Image (cartoon, grey):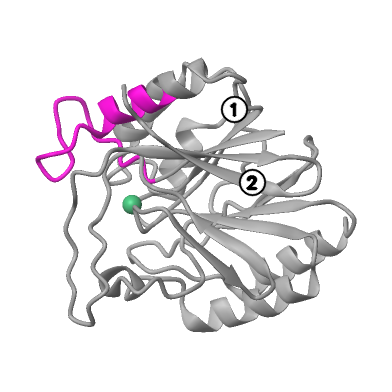
Amino acid sequence: MLIAQISDLHVTLPGQLAYGIFDTAGNLSGCLAQIMQANPVPDVVLATGDLVETGAPDEYRRLRELLAPLTMPLYLIPGNHDDRAALCAAFRDHAYLPREGEPLRYAVEDFEVRLIALDTMIPGADGGTLDDAQLDWFDATLSAAPGRPTLVLMHHPPFKTGIRCMDEIALDAASACRLGAIVERHRHVERIVCGHVHRGIQARWRGTAVSVCPSTAFQYILDLRENGFNSSTREPPAYQAHFWNGAELVTHTIAVTR
Ligand SMILES: [Fe+2]
């Protein structure tokens, strides 16, 4: 099974550049063309949040048009730039999405690797959280299929990356603590895949592996100083391919060159 992950798409309205600089729609189109020309083509694509820049309905309409070249199943989760209601309205035919107004969490049973999506967004805030109801659902969902390798997707990483500006808007500590306690009890969690940081990052965390996917739009600079600040770099857009070899989930990072 081959899982492509795209993250932090930050799609804007036509004619607009994100932060006045980045052609995020053009970069996404290049990435998707590259995914569709890969050999083999991935079985599924995951988009791990910050799908659009401001959460406006017209941005989701454009996102939908941009995603049209994908022929495989596509699963979306929101990030801090997203708007749940606008996302659900634009992707009403995505039957896995819960009803409007609820956290966009779900499980996908159709593949060799089970997929569990968590929704960490807080409307109007940059940081992330997981409330008790969602964590209880996560625990029960993991318990329902203890023998199946499972990939968890969520926007905010649960650990400190060392990049101060992003760590200040990370998943809150209480949520990360409880999430970690659940993951430690479920050894079939092969991986948690995230976005948010706009860099490729890996860590061992609470008995599983966690990876952060680079952005299809733009990357942030690696600044690990205590007083470091946030700025973009000229590193290229990228995506990741998670290959299940029957025993391990192996991750490849692919720069977008189109
Ligand atoms: Fe982002």
Identify the image quadrant of the C terminus. top left
Vertically, is 147 above or below 25? below
Assign a secondary structure to mark 1. loop
Task: Find disc 2 in the rendering and name its residue.
Answer: 250
Packing grade of label 1 (10 A; few <14, some 14-19, many >=20) is few
Magenta part of the chain = 8-32
Q: Quick one: 243 or 180, which is closer to the camera? A: 243
Please say whether residue 80 is one of the residues in the magenta stretch. Answer: no
Kindly tell me whether residue 98 is visible in this rendering.
no
Looking at the rendered structure, the kind of residue marked 1 is Asp
How many marks are shown on the rendered structure?
Answer: 2
Q: Residue at 36%, 45% (x, y): give it.
A: 215
Q: Residue at 80%, 38% (x, y): give it.
A: 112
Mark 1 C-beta to ligand 1 under 8 Å: no
Task: Find disc 1 in the rendering and name its residue.
Answer: 93
Please say whether residue 16 is one of the residues in the magenta stretch. Answer: yes
Identify the image quadrant of the N terminus. top right
The image position of residue 22, as x and y in percent, is 18, 37
